[in-house]
Amino acid sequence: MTDPTPEKALVVLSGGQDSTTCLYWALQRFGQDHVEAVTFDYGQRHRVELDCARKIAALAGVRQTVLPIDTFAAIGGNALTDDAIAPESGARADGDQALPNTFVPGRNLIFLSFAAALAYTRGARHLVTGVAQTDYSGYPDCRENTLKALELALRLGMDSRVELHAPLMHLSKAQTVTLAQQVGAMEALSFSHTCYNGEVPPCGHCAACELRAKGFAEAGVADPLVERCRQQGN
């Protein structure tokens, strides 16, 4: 009796901390030869993350596809694709229900739909994304109920058994650092990018930088990106 065809996975790799951790999670779960990555060029302010994603994919030894999506930049109206809007700084006040100006409406829905289409052509049934509803921002397209609804829509619309995985969904940032250690992602994280302002070394004052720093501090682990920049004298 022959072994069944190995399950394949496609990871949405932005080049950030969370997606990098998820890439290595997928490598551990599905195996080196059965994982690919897809990265989206959507006109983001922090375009340095595209180079980071390429470096991380190469380091991990996985095939990477970069797909251009310029519609978000054409729509504008948010701090990640509109140069006229500066990303918010600092933590949000308790009870603040308004979405931050870094929310790109529909971004994860579109990303995962395109990823599912690419996965279909690759014969990959599993999609892996780094979204987490425990993130401070409360982006509605990062919530578990959104992913469950999208998974059903993709299955119906593509007549497939596609399965969405969000390993970080219920983890705190400190817990994602611990997971990164467990799956061997720490070296890759030294090349990752989080800063909304696109600065290297990271600016340290945008909301994304503060959240990342808080996670590493709570985990009691030095951020490998910060350490690499320090060693290189940046």
Image (spheres, rainbow, N blue to C red):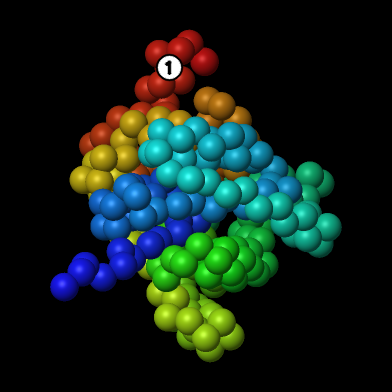
Q: Amino acid at mark 1?
A: Arg
- Image point (48%, 51%), residue name: 37
- Image point (40%, 67%), residue name: 126
Mark yes or no: residue 203 visible. Answer: no
Q: In the rendered image, which quarter contains the N terminus?
A: bottom left
The image quarter in which residue 116 lies: bottom right
**In front: 122, or 141?**
122
**In front: 71, or 1?**
1
Q: Position of residue 222 (x, y in %)?
A: 30, 30
Q: Position of residue 111 (x, y in %)?
A: 60, 63
Q: Position of residue 54 (x, y in %)?
A: 54, 37
- Position of 73 with respect to 172 (left or right) is right
- Image point (67%, 49%), residue name: 41
Residues packed near mark 1 inside 10 Å, few (<14), some (14 to 19) or many (20 plus): few
In the image, residue 204 above or below residue 14: above
- Position of 222 with respect to 202 (left or right) is left
Mark yes or no: residue 147 visible. Answer: yes
Which residue is outermost to the front? 1
Q: Position of residue 72 (x, y in %)?
A: 75, 59
- Image point (21%, 45%), residue name: 182
Which residue is outermost to the left? 1
SS label for mark 1: helix
Which residue is outermost to the bottom? 156
- What residue is shown with label 1? 230
Which residue is outermost to the top? 233
**In front: 88, or 95?**
88
